[in-house]
Image: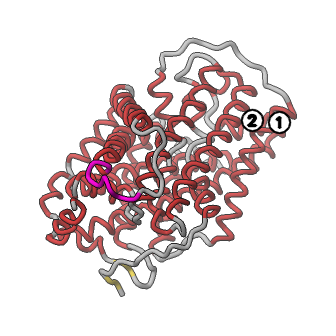
Amino acid sequence: METDAKVAPRAALTLTEGIALVVGIVIGIGIFKTPSIVASNVGSEAAFVGVWALGGLVTLIGALCYAELAAAYPHSGGEYHFLSRAWGRPIAILFGWARGTVIQPGAIAAIGFVLGDYAQQLVSLGERGPAIYALLSVLLFTGLNVVGTSEGRITQLILTALTLAAIFAVILTPLAVGPMAQASVQPVQGSLGLAMILVLLTYGGWNEAAYISAEMRDARDTARTLIIGTIILTALYVLVNFAFVSSFGLEGLRQSQAPGADLMRHAFGGYGALVLSAIVVATASSTLNGTVFTGGRIYFALGQDLPILRKLGRWDEHGQNPRNGILLQGCFALILVLIGSVTRDGFQAMVDYTAPVFWGFLLMVGIGLFVLRAKNPDRHLPFRVPLYPVTPLLFCATCLYMLYSSVAYTGYGALMGMGVVVLGVPLILFRSKSADHQDEENAQ
């Protein structure tokens, strides 16, 4: 049986659970894939480590801005809700379309390719092995979420522990076995802008904390989750990338398609590489399942606001999920995997596809902080972004630079992603009267 009624979230998450969720979502998306691509876009080892530290600082600035918004306007709609209150329902609907067709399916496909690269280390399926594994993983986790199956708490804790074990294994291995034979660094034609796109993609997922803001026991814990989680991530990412470049050297890292597995192979032989690859596949599976799970909710929100998409706004009572939305999301992700499979690097193709759209809407969220302060000057703010207005201005400037870089330094995939967003403009005409009424309440 299906129902159109929304299920109200319960405020049950503790600070520890919130931090674990954010760290668990972020780690595994790309830290075992992107370092080699980042290395191809910087000219020295110091610059390589530096961009990861800079990425952590940029992420912390963004987290502080989101902390104020999530604490002041807790809602399971996350960014959809922020944009609706700041800019009105039309912009929120366009964001919902973008998240549902570009941002989230692109992230699912990208994670699928990461999983495929490491699964290929375990059992090779030929030249197209990573793409085949990506297709199978999207089908598997879409199917599991459609029938209502999600990870249990114990399973999630085990997978998070495995993720941290893999991270610390990479960090400590160079201390135990020393560096590999390192080739001299060759000049490259890359760009800092593209390197930062990849670094910040690897930090990506921290903003998902906005979608659990309504489920935190204390509104201030959302801010603490974002800040503490970001600091932990930055420390881990800087250390693991220092370990990579210490072991491979910059030129060797550029040549590695699976640096984590290659490092463990150097240290412990084929067995070590297989163990790490299996761990990465497990953690990527966890991230992929979580991304499929949260992504399906945006279709439900759109279906509630747009009569033309009413079927997406149905909540399946048996599975306790937006079944139709999850199915549609899976279709989009499968199409993107097929497109990525014919490119030289499917993961890079997904970065090109999602980056401009992601940074464009993140910029609007950042500006929205100023808009909401002006609209609601007397509103109680459980958390205020420090050094206002400098901090949000820095965040907006960063988003603007990343938007420019993602258009200037990526390929045709960027144009395709922006074109898909434009196709969603007609949806704005199909807003429901209830949505218009909600817009009037938000403006007050």
Q: Residues within 10 Å of mark 2 (few under 14, many from 20)?
A: many
Q: What amino acid does circle 2 point to? A: Leu
Q: Quadrant of the N terminus?
A: bottom left
The residue under the point 32% across, 40% down is: 360
Magenta span: chief secondary structure: loop
Question: Is residue 14 placed above or below 412 in the rendered structure?
Answer: below
Residue 168 placement (x, y as % from top left): 76, 44
| Observer-nearest of 432 and 313 | 432
Residue 241 placement (x, y as % from top left): 67, 33
Q: Is residue 59 visible?
A: yes
Q: Secondary structure at mark 1?
A: helix
Q: Secondary structure at mark 2?
A: helix
Q: Quadrant of the C terminus?
A: bottom left
Residue lying at the far right of the rendered structure: 176
Segment tinted magenta in the rendering:
373-380
The residue under the point 62% across, 17% down is: 44
Q: Is residue 116 visible?
A: no
Task: Residue under label 1, please give it.
Answer: 267
Query: Total number of numbered labels?
Result: 2
Cα gap from disc 1 to disc 2, whole angstroms: 6 Å
The residue under the point 68% across, 70% down is: 154
Task: Residue under label 2, please give it.
Answer: 263
Q: Residues within 10 Å of mark 1 (few under 14, many from 20)?
A: some
Relative side of 260 to 307, left or right? right
User: Marks 1 and 2: CB-CB under 8 Å?
Assistant: yes
